């Protein structure tokens, strides 16, 4: 879960009202009502208040691992409503953050290919809501602010298993983040969908991890003799 105020500052309920989830509670048997908590929609949202609390005025790089929720409207394999996301966030100057984003995308692609996955890189956009959302999505795609790494997670099913986003100063402004020179800080993140990566590995190499090729087994720390459920 995440504080409602943090999610609102991040702009998620207004931009993605069709995806977010509220936490309701009932006090003393009364009718359940919305609380001050929401379900985490993106792991990185937990980090910006932490950066603000430290008063960071220079480049910062943090990682976070969280269970997330999104109101997916389909039962397609891999389109989970509750899923496991690992993210690395870079905060700092526009130049340094943009450069880090390019490096993070290259590293993610290399890492996933090293696991034997055939990934392809595509410019993408977030599923913004409504007419304004169509404009935001178009701008995001045309400026190449979001890239997805797509792989097969099942027969005839291809999905993003990782993505890289450059937020510009969106979160910097929302959370009052400032650099040493007073300029608003920029941020970028790389996100790995761990459930989908597992589905992609299973589809590519088979259901038994003890029969996978040596390279992905070594990268994942699977020792010889580890069972099929490692």
Image (tube, rainbow, N blue to C red):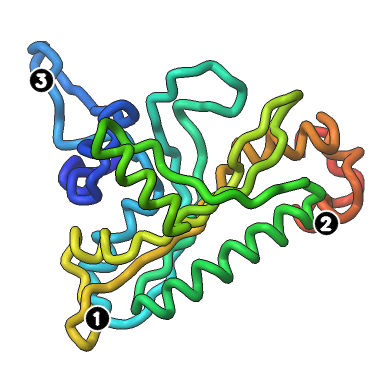
Residue at the disc numbered 1: 179
What secondary structure is found at the residue carrying circle 2? Answer: helix
User: Does residue 155 lie above or below 111 as drawn?
Assistant: above
Residue at the disc numbered 3: 27
Point 38% across, 25% down: residue: 71
Point 18% across, 50% down: residue: 9
- Mark 3 closeness class: few <14, some 14–19, many ≥20 residues within 10 Å: few
As measured in the structure, the alpha-carbon distance from the residue carrying label 1 to the one carrying label 3 is 43 Å
Chain-order first, disc 1 or disc 3: 3
Q: Which of 105 and 230 is in front in this view?
A: 105
Q: Is residue 62 left or right of residue 199?
A: left
Q: Nearer the viewer, residue 167 or 199?
A: 167
- Mark 2 closeness class: few <14, some 14–19, many ≥20 residues within 10 Å: few
- Mark 1 closeness class: few <14, some 14–19, many ≥20 residues within 10 Å: some
Residue at the disc numbered 2: 218
As measured in the structure, the alpha-carbon distance from the residue carrying label 3 to the one carrying label 2 is 51 Å
| Residue 81 spot, x, y in % from top left | 45, 26
- Mark 1 or 2: the one toward you: 1
User: Does residue 58 lie above or below 47 as drawn?
Assistant: below
Chain-order first, disc 3 or disc 2: 3
């Amino acid at each position: 879960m995440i504080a409602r105020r943090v999610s609102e500052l991040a702009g998620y309920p207004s931009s993605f009202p069709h995806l977010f989830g509220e936490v309701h509670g009932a006090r003393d048997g009364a009718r359940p009502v919305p609380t001050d908590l929401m379900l985490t929609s993106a792991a990185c949202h937990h980090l910006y208040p932490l950066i603000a609390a430290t008063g960071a005025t220079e480049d910062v790089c943090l990682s976070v691992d969280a269970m997330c929720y999104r109101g997916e409207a389909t039962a397609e394999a891999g389109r989970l409503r509750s899923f496991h996301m690992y993210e690395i966030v870079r905060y700092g100057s526009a130049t340094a953050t943009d450069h880090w984003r390019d490096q993070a995308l290259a590293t993610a692609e290399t890492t996933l290919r090293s696991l034997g996955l055939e990934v392809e890189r595509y410019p993408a956009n977030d599923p913004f809501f409504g007419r304004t959302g169509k404009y935001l999505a178009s701008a995001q795609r045309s400026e190449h602010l979001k890239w997805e790494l797509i792989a097969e997670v099942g027969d005839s099913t291809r999905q993003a298993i990782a993505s890289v986003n450059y937020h510009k100063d969106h979160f910097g402004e929302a959370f009052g983040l400032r650099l040493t020179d007073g300029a608003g800080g920029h941020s970028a993140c790389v996100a790995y969908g761990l459930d989908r990566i597992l589905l992609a590995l299973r589809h590519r190499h088979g259901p038994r991890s003890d029969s996978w090729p040596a390279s992905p087994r070594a990268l994942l720390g699977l020792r010889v003799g580890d069972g099929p459920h490692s």
